[in-house]
Image (cartoon, grey):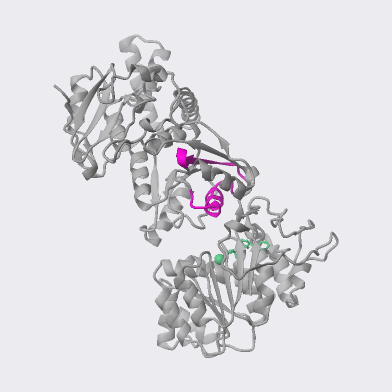
Amino acid sequence: MTQIIDGSTLVGAADSQAALAQPCEAETASSTISLGSDTALDFPEAPDSAIAQVVIPADDAVTEAPATETAATEPTAPETAAPVSAFAAFGLRRELLEGLAAIGFEEPSPIQKAAIPELMLGRDLVGQAQTGTGKTAAFGLPLLERLDPGQRTPQVLVLTPTRELAMQVAEAFNSYAACMKGVKVLPVYGGADFRDQIQQLRRGVQIVVGTPGRVMDHMRQGTLDLSGLRSLVLDEADEMLRMGFIDDVKWVLEQLPAERQVVLFSATMPPEIRRISQNHLKNPAEVTIRQKAADGRRIRQRHLVVNGPQKLEALERVLEAVGSEGVIIFARTKAITLTVAESLEQHGYDVAVLNGDVPQTQRERTIERLRDGRVNVLVATDVAARGLDVDRIGLVINYDIPFDGEAYVHRIGRTGRAGRSGEAILFLTPRERRFLGGLERAVNQPIEPMEVPGNASINQHRLDRLRQKLTAALQQPACNPEERALLGEILQRVAQEQACTPEQLALAALELGLGGKPLLLQGEERWGQGRAGAPTRERDRDRGERDRGGERRPFNDRHQERGEDGPEDNMERFRIEVGWRDRVKPGNIVGAIANESGLAGRSIGKIRIFDAHSTVDLPKGMPDDVFADLRRLRVMNKELQISRLGS
Ligand code: ADP
Ligand code: MG
């Protein structure tokens, strides 16, 4: 039997209560939760973290036939319901209900509703659900219910992909079982003291939660006796596959007693995982929780239409004008994450990349850096960002359109967390516009149009930011008192020598702070005007050519064009010695030249990329020293060797 259930994420929903509550002296919240099949769970006591979700329409669902829709049963929970009545309905023992009351669980989540009754019967189960849907309690409660505290050898083994997860799951078991006598839970993972674990195992443990490697070590050494095992849980099975543990998992499965219950949870169902469930699970119950949209009301969603070759520049503009304190940019491939990150780095952003090539340990470090603000922009693929839970994400940019509504929902759910507001911006190429409707249906609300921010709004934003930075610098000096005193002396001395006013002095200091970069973008015209839906002659003509022209002309007067080939009147064409072969992109060239020459990115004209070289149009009258600098400038690790064409 397959159940498909409309899910909701509960990320961190009860963490706060868990920390505060006193086990076994349950003081439950008075608010009642109504639950319909379409209503997301709402945890009024934890508004910060309960993210309401919207259902993906059935035709977008990723489930396989045969599937029967089951509405969430349990229209109960009346206003006067006794605490944890909804969990009591499962027939859980009193101590467990007290444990749940203490951590503030009132209403089972959809996966808990579906899985707990099956697991209480001792059935095998395959569950497909994203992180944050409440899987731990979905298996933890029924397995605790079936536990025999009298048996001192392990009865439950949970395998998790990481040690963090192992610790989390072990903690969760402890909190559910806080009022049960004689339940011993042991997390077992690499890096922790082996002998200590052996001691604890000897003293008697019923529930072992561990990573595959360390669990296998104990099994091989005979220090983990699984002869009395009743249940095995594979938590985040796809993650274990991704991290290369799948053979270990199979090995463990093969060592288990023939009569045992196997529970497999996975966010996705790659063939390898499906095979495991076919080969090692007996007539399993199947539960699929469909991911719902993140709370649309909290996330402002917009889209903009931009041609492929202009995406990078559009991205930079969006970041400058809309940028917030934490940004995640989603790209479709690893290669694109790298291109985007490189380009942003060149523009001075603190960027990190998260893709499938990034090893787990580094991945965790990256997320930590994003969390504490050392990294402000993360460029990620879908897989790599799965389950990523960082509160300070204010903006999600879908640089490439996601594959389906579910992915879109998942991506934008990275912002608007913990009660904050968030923004999501979707880049569409003119052709991809037809997918907008599907995504809007997935979130059940319109995704408003916006334009690539023009010079005026970027300039306004720059001025605002400068003012904020100046104010912050006044309020919170960055230097230590000694250095400040020295700076003060310098100011005094210059003021005397130059006989200038404090205002003149401050201005000079501000200009110095700009580091030689122009404060404002020049030109009035709006970016991308008439561009997004531009006729085909404006698009790429062949692989070897990328057209960046058009919108850079004043007033976008195409009639002034001097034929296809020549540069515009006020421009001059240059040759540079990087091309397709070096995998250079227009964005790399613009970024590098803009940085080095001080030209605004926009005043850089048409770029054409050929096999071994490229051409670029730059404003006439380039000063000799800039020219000399550009000659030595390196892009994609090659000197540009810039030269004037036709001279
Ligand atoms: P998953 O394993 O699916 O990622 P977890 O089991 O870690 O999800 O649960 C996510 C968060 O939701 C945790 O903080 C957990 O305490 C909380 N939670 C789970 N079930 C409930 C519930 N029925 N009521 C309230 N909070 C819950
Ligand atoms: Mg989990």
Asked if 131 appears above or below 352 in the picture, the reply is: below
Q: Residue 148, how many percent across, how many down?
A: 65, 86
Residue 382: give x, y in percent of width and height: 46, 54
Residue 422 falls within the magenta-colored stretch: yes
Q: Nearer the viewer, residue 414 or 408?
A: 408
Residue 136 falls in image quadrant:
bottom right
Residue at image position (75%, 59%) is 35
**Could you tell me how many numbered marks the image carries?**
0
Judge whether residue 9 can be spotted in this image: no
x then y, percent, for residue 474: 48, 27
Q: Residue furthest right?
A: 80
Nearest the viewer among 490 and 470 is 470
From the image, which quarter does the N terminus lie in? bottom right
Q: Nearer the viewer, residue 331 or 172?
A: 331
Residues drawn in magenta: 402-431
As drawn, the residue found furthest toward the top would be 499
Whether residue 311 is visible to the viewer of this picture, yes or no, is yes
Q: Please state the quadrant of the image where ligand 1 appears.
A: bottom right
- Image coordinates of residue 594 in percent, x first then y, are 30, 29
Magenta-span inclusion, residue 394:
no
Residue 242 occupies which quadrant of the picture?
A: bottom left
Q: Tell me the quadrant of the picture where the C terminus can be found.
A: top left
Decide if residue 64 is on the left or right side of residue 178: left
